[in-house]
Image (tube, helix red, strand yellow):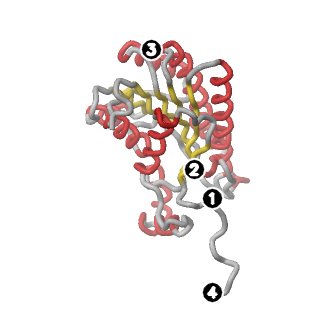
Amino acid sequence: MNRFQTKTAIVTGGASGIGRETSVQLANEGCHVIVADLNFDKAEEVAKNLATDSIGFKLDVSSEESWLDIMRCTEETFGGLDILVNSAGIGFAGDFEDMPLSEWNAMMSVNLTGTFLGCQKAIKLMKKKGTPAAIANISSLGGLVGGEDIAGYCASKGGVTLLTKSVALYCAGKGYDIRCNSIHPTYVDTEMLDPIADAFGSRKTMLDGMASQVPVGRVAKPADIASAILYLCSPEASMVTGHQMVVDGGQLAGMRAQHSTK
């Protein structure tokens, strides 16, 4: 398919995981991609291997000046912006009473402030072009329910959930043809799980444990999440805005069998 022919997208966190796979899928459907990441070398490597003319960009999502720079670059290089995927994110786990303020601040800065800045600056550029545009914000199941040992992460992703709804309503209220939706994945087998795998001593042991909590019996792959992102950014989703797309293998559907003896 070529749903994104002639379109331009910025994908944050594009050097790895969900961001990298989203960049690949967008480019395979004709989109020019600005692969944005703090790790410029990896971002540039991803961009060079995409199916369209695309570029890497060193982006600190927590910096307003960095966002202004990438918007200028996008307009000068590709003439405007059609899609923003806010995929950059970090997380720390641990006992709530002992959570360092530095970890809390880091998660808020990257996960929530970074998404806020991206939405704000993208809207200004998107509306100049005057054609349909879309923003996809990566939240989490932890943006819908709490987590005993990931309170700060859940707080930051919960903020992303309601920020998304507010941005969607803002754009609709202003008459902008810009949609904004959030994606809520279950566990995804990406580099973000590496520290957890180290704690388990085996990646397989970790993934098996996580899969046991997911009704379909496995954790998600980056491609599973990227496919949902592409739908939300496509013309097929033109009536979908302010929506929370859960990609969790049935994890939040309800309680599994535990009330009978058979």
Residue annotated with mark 2: 246
Tell me the quadrant of the picture where the C terminus can be found: bottom right
SS type, badge 2: strand
The amino acid pointed to by label 3 is Arg
State the separation of the CA atoms marked 3 and 1. Answer: 40 Å
Mark 1 crowdedness (10 Å alpha carbons): few <14, some 14-19, many ≥20: some
Give yes or no for contact between labels 1 and 2 (Cβ–Cβ under 8 Å).
yes
Seen in the picture, residue 3 relative to 144 is either above or below; the reply is above
Seen in the picture, residue 202 relative to 64 is either above or below; the reply is below
Q: Position of residue 49 (x, y in %)?
A: 26, 36
State the separation of the CA atoms marked 1 and 2. Answer: 8 Å
Residue annotated with mark 1: 252
- At 63% across and 55% down in the image, what residue appears? 94
- At 47% across and 18% down in the image, what residue appears? 71
Residue annotated with mark 3: 72
Tag shown at residue 116: none
SS type, badge 1: loop
For residue 57, what is the image quadrant?
top left
The amino acid pointed to by label 1 is Leu
SS type, badge 3: helix
State the separation of the CA atoms marked 3 and 2. Answer: 33 Å
For residue 55, what is the image quadrant?
top left
The amino acid pointed to by label 4 is Lys
Which badge, 3 or 4, is on the more N-terminal residue? 3
User: Which of label 3 and label 4 is nearer to you?
Assistant: 4
Residue annotated with mark 4: 262
Q: Position of residue 252 (x, y in %)?
A: 63, 59
Which badge, 1 or 2, is on the more N-terminal residue? 2
The amino acid pointed to by label 2 is Val
Give yes or no for contact between labels 1 and 4 (Cβ–Cβ under 8 Å).
no
